[in-house]
Amino acid sequence: MNFDELYKIAAETVNERKLSDYTSAGSVAAAILTDKGNVYKGVCIDAPCSMGFCAEHAAIAAMITAGESRIIKMVAVSAWDDIIPPCGRCREFIYQINNENINCEVMLKDKIVTLDYLLPNRWS
Protein backbone atom coordinates (compact mmCIF):
# COMPACT_ATOMS: atom_id res chain seq x y z
CA MET A 1 0.00 0.00 0.00
CA ASN A 2 1.33 3.43 -0.86
CA PHE A 3 1.04 6.61 1.21
CA ASP A 4 -1.68 8.09 -1.00
CA GLU A 5 -3.94 5.15 -0.14
CA LEU A 6 -3.06 5.30 3.56
CA TYR A 7 -3.66 9.07 3.60
CA LYS A 8 -7.09 8.57 2.00
CA ILE A 9 -8.08 6.10 4.74
CA ALA A 10 -7.00 8.54 7.48
CA ALA A 11 -8.72 11.51 5.81
CA GLU A 12 -11.97 9.56 5.42
CA THR A 13 -11.81 8.60 9.11
CA VAL A 14 -11.72 12.21 10.38
CA ASN A 15 -15.18 12.84 11.85
CA GLU A 16 -15.12 15.67 14.33
CA ARG A 17 -18.01 15.51 16.76
CA LYS A 18 -19.05 16.47 20.27
CA LEU A 19 -19.53 13.54 22.63
CA SER A 20 -20.65 15.43 25.75
CA ASP A 21 -20.57 18.90 27.25
CA TYR A 22 -16.82 18.56 27.76
CA THR A 23 -15.55 15.93 25.36
CA SER A 24 -15.12 15.74 21.60
CA ALA A 25 -13.66 13.16 19.25
CA GLY A 26 -12.54 12.61 15.70
CA SER A 27 -10.76 15.87 14.90
CA VAL A 28 -7.62 13.82 14.20
CA ALA A 29 -7.49 10.38 12.58
CA ALA A 30 -4.51 8.10 12.09
CA ALA A 31 -3.97 5.15 9.78
CA ILE A 32 -1.14 2.67 10.26
CA LEU A 33 0.07 -0.12 7.98
CA THR A 34 1.61 -3.18 9.63
CA ASP A 35 4.24 -5.58 8.41
CA LYS A 36 1.44 -8.10 7.78
CA GLY A 37 -0.26 -5.69 5.37
CA ASN A 38 -3.14 -4.77 7.66
CA VAL A 39 -4.37 -1.23 8.17
CA TYR A 40 -5.61 0.00 11.53
CA LYS A 41 -7.17 3.37 12.12
CA GLY A 42 -8.17 5.43 15.10
CA VAL A 43 -9.39 8.86 16.13
CA CYS A 44 -8.46 11.15 18.97
CA ILE A 45 -10.65 11.72 22.00
CA ASP A 46 -10.25 15.16 23.54
CA ALA A 47 -11.42 15.19 27.15
CA PRO A 48 -10.72 17.46 30.10
CA CYS A 49 -8.21 16.62 32.82
CA SER A 50 -5.84 14.98 30.30
CA MET A 51 -7.99 11.86 30.08
CA GLY A 52 -8.21 11.81 26.28
CA PHE A 53 -5.80 10.24 23.85
CA CYS A 54 -4.34 10.68 20.39
CA ALA A 55 -5.52 9.08 17.16
CA GLU A 56 -2.23 7.20 16.91
CA HIS A 57 -2.89 5.59 20.30
CA ALA A 58 -6.36 4.50 19.17
CA ALA A 59 -4.97 2.96 15.97
CA ILE A 60 -2.19 1.22 17.92
CA ALA A 61 -4.71 -0.15 20.42
CA ALA A 62 -6.67 -1.70 17.54
CA MET A 63 -3.45 -3.16 16.14
CA ILE A 64 -2.41 -4.62 19.50
CA THR A 65 -5.91 -6.03 20.01
CA ALA A 66 -5.51 -7.85 16.69
CA GLY A 67 -2.20 -9.32 17.83
CA GLU A 68 0.21 -7.12 15.86
CA SER A 69 2.87 -4.60 16.89
CA ARG A 70 5.11 -3.83 13.90
CA ILE A 71 4.28 -0.61 11.99
CA ILE A 72 5.61 -0.05 8.47
CA LYS A 73 3.89 3.23 7.54
CA MET A 74 1.69 5.76 9.28
CA VAL A 75 -0.08 9.05 8.71
CA ALA A 76 -2.26 11.33 10.85
CA VAL A 77 -4.72 13.84 9.43
CA SER A 78 -6.48 16.66 11.29
CA ALA A 79 -9.74 18.42 10.55
CA TRP A 80 -7.99 21.81 10.66
CA ASP A 81 -4.54 21.33 9.16
CA ASP A 82 -4.46 18.20 6.96
CA ILE A 83 -1.38 16.03 7.60
CA ILE A 84 0.19 16.41 11.04
CA PRO A 85 3.19 14.66 12.62
CA PRO A 86 2.76 12.47 15.68
CA CYS A 87 3.31 14.32 18.95
CA GLY A 88 6.31 13.49 21.13
CA ARG A 89 4.28 11.20 23.38
CA CYS A 90 3.05 9.23 20.36
CA ARG A 91 6.55 9.00 18.89
CA GLU A 92 7.91 7.43 22.05
CA PHE A 93 4.84 5.16 22.39
CA ILE A 94 5.21 3.89 18.81
CA TYR A 95 8.83 3.01 19.48
CA GLN A 96 8.14 1.33 22.82
CA ILE A 97 5.39 -0.89 21.34
CA ASN A 98 7.99 -2.55 19.10
CA ASN A 99 11.60 -1.35 18.85
CA GLU A 100 11.62 -2.13 15.11
CA ASN A 101 9.02 0.62 14.70
CA ILE A 102 11.93 3.07 14.82
CA ASN A 103 12.21 2.36 11.07
CA CYS A 104 8.53 2.95 10.24
CA GLU A 105 7.89 5.64 7.67
CA VAL A 106 5.83 8.67 8.69
CA MET A 107 4.10 10.89 6.17
CA LEU A 108 4.58 14.61 6.81
CA LYS A 109 3.16 17.47 4.73
CA ASP A 110 6.23 17.80 2.56
CA LYS A 111 8.13 14.51 2.87
CA ILE A 112 8.30 10.98 4.19
CA VAL A 113 10.63 10.41 7.16
CA THR A 114 11.37 7.57 9.55
CA LEU A 115 10.39 7.56 13.18
CA ASP A 116 14.13 7.53 13.90
CA TYR A 117 14.34 10.95 12.21
CA LEU A 118 11.50 12.27 14.40
CA LEU A 119 12.79 10.65 17.59
CA PRO A 120 16.59 11.03 17.59
CA ASN A 121 17.02 11.04 21.37
CA ARG A 122 14.68 8.35 22.61
CA TRP A 123 13.91 7.56 26.20
CA SER A 124 15.62 4.16 26.10
Image (cartoon, helix red, strand yellow):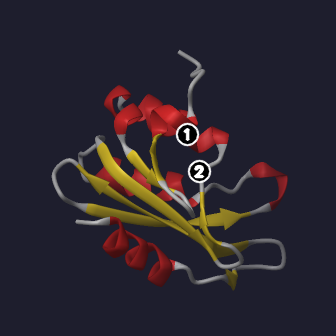
- The N terminus lies in which quarter of the figure? bottom left
* Residue in the picture at 55% in, 61% down: 110
Q: Residue furthest top?
A: 124
Q: Of the residues under marks 1 and 2, which one precedes in the sequence?
A: 2
Q: Position of residue 78 (x, y in %)?
A: 63, 72
Q: Position of residue 118 (x, y in %)?
A: 56, 38
Q: Where is 59 relative to 103, above or below?
A: below
Task: State left or right for residue 91 relative to residue 65.
Answer: right
Q: How many marks?
A: 2
- Crowding near the residue tagged with mark 1, few <14, some 14–19, many ≥20 C-alpha atoms within 10 Å: some
Quadrant housing residue 68: top left
Residue picked out by circle 1:
91
Left or right: 38 as drawn, with respect to 28: left
Q: Kindly check if marks 1 and 2 are in contact, taking CB atoms under 8 A apart as contact.
A: yes
Residue 74 in which image quadrant: bottom left
* Disc 1 to disc 2, C-alpha distance: 6 Å
Question: Which disc, if any, is residue 17?
Answer: none
Left or right? Give the position of 79 relative to 99: right
Q: Position of residue 75 (x, y in %)?
A: 46, 61
In this figure, which residue is indicated by the disc labeled 2?
Answer: 86
Residue located at (52% from left, 51% from top) = 57
53 and 116: which one is in front? Answer: 116
Q: Nearer the viewer, residue 107 or 98?
A: 107
Circle 1 SS class: helix
Report helix, strand or loop for mark 2.
loop
Q: Horizontally, is 26 left or right of 74 in the view?
A: right
Q: Residues within 10 Å of mark 2 (few under 14, many from 20)?
A: many
Amino acid carrying label 1: it is Arg
